[in-house]
Image (cartoon, rainbow, N blue to C red):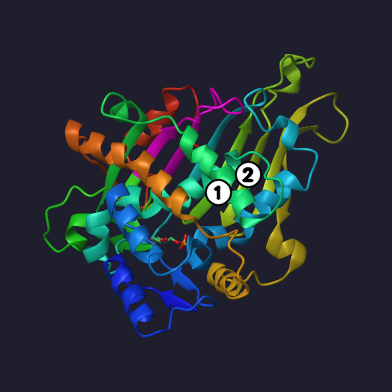
Amino acid sequence: MFYLAVGPALFGDIAGHLKAAGLATAQSRLVVEKPIGRDLASACALNKAIASVFDEHQVFRIDHYLGKETVQNLMALRFANALYEPLWNSAHVDHVQITVAETVGLEGRAGYYDKAGALRDMVQNHMLQLLCLTAMEPPASLDADAVRDEKLKVLRALKPVDAANASRLTVRGQYRAGAANGGPAKGYLEELEGGVSDTETFVALKAEIENWRWAGVPFYLRTGKRLAARVSEIVVQFKPIPHSIFGEQAGRCVANQLVIRLQPDEGVKQWIMIKDPGPGGMRLRHVPLDMSFAESFGIRNPDAYERLLMDAVRGYQTLFMRRDEVEQAWAWVDPILAAWAETHQETQGYTAGTWGPSGSIALIERDGRTWHESL
Ligand code: BG6
């Protein structure tokens, strides 16, 4: 097994040399790290170079989010329970939110990050993978191609974002000086040491999936560096009940919500309404059925990489991205990048240690919704 954690420009050369040296045999496997390209054309070129040496079944494209415990639990939750699947559609789901928030800044990766930005670094891969697993149809089995076929269909059904709608559907942000991890934090440009840059360190966007299951159900995505907390979660917001039989004194019926927490404190919270215990009539309360994996199982979750590298050794490709998936994700992201360039959509500043620019709040509030408070 050859594991390439190198700049993607070297993938093709290394694969070629492995072949020339007689090391690329039918038993070999090639593990490659993101970024797989910086747009559709470069991703296709990389995939082609790799394919000239290795067969697709020998190639393992890592997206470490797929190795996270809760991400796989999403599949268990959806497909090992009869409870959710009948509700998992536009008749019952109001919208979905996917947040991947980080408190770290550039971490000395300016050379790479400033050329990439949050859309390429996080949305094209991790965020779209989470969206796919949330939105895909039930695959017939956990077989690698069965799962990846379904994810690909979701990517193909994403409504295009272009110059006509980008300013309404997307927000770009860049952090200014503020606070992080209990101390002062520099702004992005200061971290670049005087550089001039409009690279986004934050993206919020509204994605729509044009198929029968999800028509009219927005998927709001946001990710950024130097945000208020490190938290990654998927929130499935169900629709409100159609009619309340309880009087005003009972309090408001809050719609059900399923919160799948990827990190930290991995777990699942199903928010439901119950009667406030005790005498005093019928008063309703919104409470979570709270399942913290650490508390319930008390075990150490393997790091995403431990699991993924072990899967590669075993030859299981289910949690790795297939060539067409990566290319389809770029095919959706490319027009967003082009629209930003064409319309000169600039980054909005946000103070380090906050939840991003005000435009992100406006993006969701325009639709009468709010971001889930992740703390
Ligand atoms: C990487 C990105 O893929 O994921 C980084 O390149 C980001 O910019 C990291 O910080 C986040 O991973 P995790 O597992 O810490 O959420």
Quarter of the displayed picture in which ligand 1 can be seen: bottom left
Distance of mark 2 from mark 1, alpha carbons? 7 Å
Numbered range of the magenta stretch:
203-223
SS under mark 2:
strand
User: Relative to 323, is 114 on the left or the right?
Assistant: left
Above or below, 181 against 205 in this view is: below
- The structure residue drawn at horizontal position 69% and vertical position 64%, both measured from the top left corner, is 294
Question: Disc 2 marks which residue?
Answer: 259
Query: In the displayed structure, does residue 284 sit left or right of residue 200?
Result: right
Question: Would residue 363 be seen by someone viewing this image from the given angle?
Answer: yes
Which one is earlier in the sequence, the residue at label 2 or at label 1?
A: 1
Label 1 SS: strand
**Foreground pick, 97 / 308:** 308
Relative image position of residue 127 (x, y in whole percent): 46, 48
The image position of residue 99, as x and y in percent, is 48, 46
Vertical order, 60 against 240 (above or below): below
Q: Along the line of sight, which residue is nearer the eye, 154 or 365?
A: 154
Instruction: Please state if 184 lies on the left or on the right of 100 as rendered.
Output: left
**57 and 159: which one is in front?**
57
